Every structure is written in structure tokens, then in C-alpha cells.
Image (spheres, helix red, strand yellow):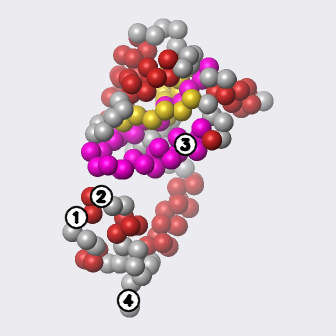
Amino acid sequence: MIEQAMRAERENGKQAVILIGHGSRAAGADDDMARVARGLRAAGDGIVEICRMSGRGPRFVEAFEKCIRQEAKEIIVIPYFLHFGVHLRQDIPEMLREAVAKHPEVRLVLGRHLGYDDALVALVERRIAESETLCDVRDLPRSPIDRRPEEMGGEPRLE
């Protein structure tokens, strides 16, 4: 019942979600976070934005203001991080407090980071199994910055 009410708020635009990731200067480095955001939107989660702590934008303030312009009254920030480090302990809460100080009419919630979940164990097991067919690291191209790992070593090993 509560979940249905929350989804209704998201669908009517009163609630928004911002995924905040670390960021990178490498093009496409955070495509997966953008895919998650698209999946949330497609599932009917209403306003969903992404932002980054560093590297290529947008920054949190830009995503926050975009949600405000779309008349969000509650914004839930989900840190797209596995580890509970300095960004989560200090940088992000401070950044959120500064942003919401200018908008007292908005409720801003810092949700839990991705962290540990039993689903991650299964995912890591799957990645281990997938790695059995990848090439040895010595056979990887020298400049892999523009390609994802699965694009670099997809050839099966010769034994």
C-alpha cells in the first residue's frame, strides 16, 4: 500500500529521484548509471535524474534544480556507490544541505548507497564465470581507456 502511494507520487511528478555517481573524465564511463535511470523511468518512477561528483557533468546542483523546475516536492538522492567512503560520509551530505537551504519547500532525502546486497554476490559469481572465456591481461590492447572490459577481451582463451 505504501509502495503504491510512493509510486503514485513519483508518477505525478511530486517526487523525484537523483542517482549520484562518482564520475569520470572518460566518455561513456557512467553509461551504466544512465541505463539504470532510464530503466527507473520506464518502470514509471517519474522524474529520475543523474549527476556526478567529478569529471563530466551534470553536477548535483544542476540535477537538483532540474527536479525543482519540474515541480518536485520531494527528492530522493540515491548514491550510486558500493563503498561507504568520504563522498558518502561527508561530501554528499554537505552538498545536499547547501542545495536544500535555498529551497525550504522541498524535502530532500539521502537514501542508502548501493553497498552490500545479496544480489551482488550472485552478480560477482556471474562475472567470475564470464571471465573464464576472456583473454589473459597481457593480450589486452595497450590503450583501453575508450573501451569497456568486455569489449577488450571477448575472445576465448586458447588452452
- Judging by the rendered image, the residue that carries numbered circle 2 is 146
Residue at the (43%, 15%) spot, across then down: 100
Q: Is residue 95 above or below residue 58?
A: above
Residue at the (65%, 41%) spot, across then down: 43
The amino acid type found where label 3 is placed reads: Arg
Residue at the (53%, 60%) spot, across then down: 123
| CA–CA distance in space, label 4 to label 1 | 23 Å
Q: Is residue 15 above or below residue 103?
A: below
Q: Residue 98 bears which disc, if any?
A: none
Question: Which is more foreground, mark 2 or mark 4?
Answer: 2
> How far from the left and from the top, in percent, is residue 115?
47, 45
Residue at the (54%, 50%) spot, across then down: 117
**Are circles 1 and 2 on residues that touch, CB within 8 Å?**
yes
- Where does the magenta region start and end? 14-41
Circle 1 — which element?
A: loop
> How far from the left and from the top, in percent, is residue 159?
38, 91
- Judging by the rendered image, the residue that carries numbered circle 4 is 158
| CA–CA distance in space, label 3 to label 1 | 30 Å
> How far from the left and from the top, in percent, is residue 57?
33, 35
Q: Residue 143 bears which disc, if any?
A: 1
| CA–CA distance in space, label 1 to label 2 | 8 Å
| CA–CA distance in space, label 2 to label 3 | 23 Å
